Every structure is written in structure tokens, then in C-alpha cells.
Image (cartoon, rainbow, N blue to C red):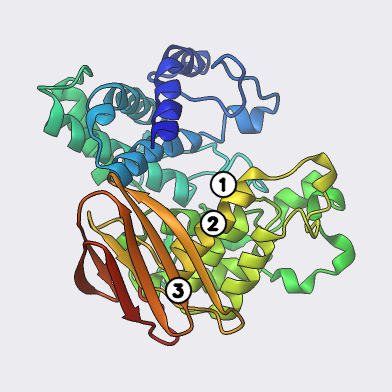
Amino acid sequence: PEVTKNLLKYRHNQLPQAIHNAQQQGLKGALYPMVTFTGVECHNEWEITFEEIHRNGAIAYAIYNYTNYTGDIDYLKNEGLEVLAEIARFWADRVHFSKRNNQYMIHGVTGPNEYENNINNNWYTNTIACWVLRYTRENYLKFKEESTAKISDDELAHWQEIAENMYFPVDEELGIFVQHDTFLDKDLKPVAELSASELPLNQHWSWDKILRSCFIKQADVLQGIYFFNDSFTKEEKQRNFDFYEPMTVHESSLSPSIHAILAAELGMEDKAVEMYQRTARLDLDNYNNDTEDGLHITSMTGSWLAIVQGFAQMKTDHEQLRFAPFLPKTWSAYSFHINYRDRLLFVAVSNEQVTLNLLSGEALPLEVYEKAYVLTDHLTIPLREGEANV
């Protein structure tokens, strides 16, 4: 937790430079850089620097994640709200109001799928922008008497108006969230129709051909479903997974772990194991023909996440730790440690049982397979065969 908190303090220390980055684009608030040595943007590709603004949402989500896992609100009340306020100001200035649709929109962006540029209303970007506005407003109203951040009533009202009237592209017939306004007009086809000699695309296709294609570099809509998992039904998750994953080439080290987690949650064991193997062995097996450029730390982290949030189905979005573990049929066991709100837990899953040990800290209320327990020392619970709760 201290390492994470120091990283968040670093973000606060770099807030003046992030404000400078936004000003360079003629915008209010703060825009955190994609690449930097000093806090000022050092990336040299305009479509990333100016358009991949969803990164601002990830900075805010890290504050939420830290607070949710640790229960520590000191950072949130002070440095955190100062960062959140400036990110919210950026989003409030970056949106525009469409008189024709009577809704707010965000045009000219690059979403998590970097195989598309300069698109309008990327579902993920619009989703995380709205979430930031709501999360910042909610916590400022809760802590404003104690916080060093200052937000006016007019700003709070405007942020609420934007969040309540944001446009999100959806397709009612398909029952999916649409990646962006014109995605469904593309020539939609699965990756399975490509020859092995064409992969990875970024080493065999022209950039123009990639941008016009339907192929997705990494989780985009599915990244939003992963982040805000509890906001969607099982059916919504399944439809969007079934629609987007077949078109995803996973040519980012960030991609397989997210798909492994969602596939595990949806009970798609073979796909979950396939995606886990891809994230765990990305560099060992040189999946994307780029191991010579260096190892992918994000994929290493993704291996851990795929086990903990995927196969063990650990969730924290109800202010309480929840598990619904299952064991892939080709595995004999897995185990991990987790730091959660001043406790250290050891979790082991075998082909017969789930074992939880409290190694340090006070007794912890938690749920396993939707049943409430209090972990005081040691718990052993029978494994549910094929379990994958949503």
C-alpha cells in the first residue's frame, strides 16, 4: 500500500505540469501525460498525445482503487481530490453539447484500441469521463469541509448535468455498447479469418489499413466493463464479450489479462485459460514478435490479476471482499497473497477446497460464493465445481 500511495503522491506532485499539458491544448484542468520524464508530455505522436485522453480517467481510477482496497481516505480527502478536481475540469471543458442530439459528446479521440484514431464518442472514453465527474462530485460533497480542494457550486452543478446527459453509442438490436459512432459501419470479421502470416498486424499491415479495419488491439468496451463490472448484467457482459473478443488481436500486453478475467467470470473456462496463458507467457513465447524490445511488466501484472480477479473471482466493489473461486480442469491448485485494509490474507484453491488464512490484521468480514463469513484465523470451504459467479 505504501508503494501505491507514493505513486499517487507522485501524480499530485506532477499536477502543475498536467495543468500545463491541458493549457497547451487550450483546455482547462489537468491532462496527465502518456510519456514523461518531467511531468510535461514527451510523447511524439499527436494521435496519442492529443487524443488518447482516456488516460486521465485511469489516473482517477487509481485513486478509487487505492481507496477501495486500503480503506485509507486521507489521500482522497486532500491530494486526491485536488487531482480529481482538475481532471474533472478537463473533462467538463473537453466535452461539447450537441444541439441536434441534446446530449454531451466527446469527439476526436483515440480509445484504448489504438488501432483507430480521431473517432467520435468512444464508449469507454465517454463512460470513464462521466464516472470521473460523478466520483469527484460525490467525494467533494462528502469531504469538502476537510479537503484542501476547492470546487464551486456552479462547477458541481455543471458536472452533474454533463454526467446525466452524456451520449453513449449503443445498438439495441445487437444488445451491445458500440465502440464508437461508426464502428458498426466497418467490414466486421473475426481474427480467425486472417492468415498467420499477417500477424501481428502492426508488423505486416500499413497503418492506413489497420485504422480502417475492425480489428481491435486491446480491450476497449470490455475495459470499461471490467472497470465498472458491477454496473452491468451478466447478459450485457456476455453479449459484448462475444461480439468484441473475436475481433481482438491482443497486440497489446494489456489485453489478454482483461479478457481472461471476464471470460472466467462468464464461466468460459477454455477462453479464460487461453487468455491467461497468453498473458503469462507473452514474452516467453514471443506472441507479438517483440520480446527483443524488452519485457512487458504490464503482462506480468496481468498474470496475477487473471488468477486473483479471474479464477478466484475476487471483487471489492461492494465495500467487502468477495470470492467465488473455481479451478481450471487442467490445474491442480493455485494460491496467492492479498493486502486488504490492513490485513494480509493467503488464499489457496485446490481441486477440493478453498482455504483462506488471515496472516495479520483484525478479523475480516467477507463473502465466499455469496455466503457471509468472518475470517478470524482460518477458513476452509468446499470448492464448487465449475463455479463462476457474476
User: How many marks on residues?
Assistant: 3
Circle 1 sits on which residue? 112
Q: Position of residue 86 (x, y in %)?
A: 34, 22
Residue at horizontal 26%, vertical 49%? 361
Which residue in the structure is indicated by mark 2? 304
Of the residues shown, which amino acid type is indicated by label 3?
Val
- Mark 3 vs 1, N-terminal side: 1
Specify the quadrant that holds the N terminus: top left
Circles 3 and 2: CB distance less than 8 Å? no
Q: What kind of element bears circle 1?
A: loop
What separation in Å lies between label 3 and label 2 (alpha carbons)?
14 Å
Q: Where is residue 363 in the image (x, y as percent from the top left)?
A: 20, 56
Q: What residue type is labelled 2?
A: Trp
The quadrant of the picture occupied by the C terminus is bottom left
Answer yes or no: is residue 133 visible: yes
Q: Of label 2 and label 1, which has the lower sequence position?
A: 1
Instruction: Check contact, mark 3 vs mark 1: CB within 8 A.
Output: no
Badge 3: few (under 14), some or many (20 or more) residues near its Cα, within 10 Å?
many
The numbered mark, 3 or 2, whose residue comes first in the sequence reads: 2
Which residue is drawn at the image coordinates 47% and 24% (left, top)? Answer: 31
Mark 1 belongs to which amino acid?
Answer: Pro
In space, the residues marked 3 and 1 are separated at their CA atoms by: 33 Å
Pick whichever, 217 or 162, lies toward us.
217
Q: Residue 349 carries which label?
A: 3
Classify mark 2: helix, strand or loop.
helix
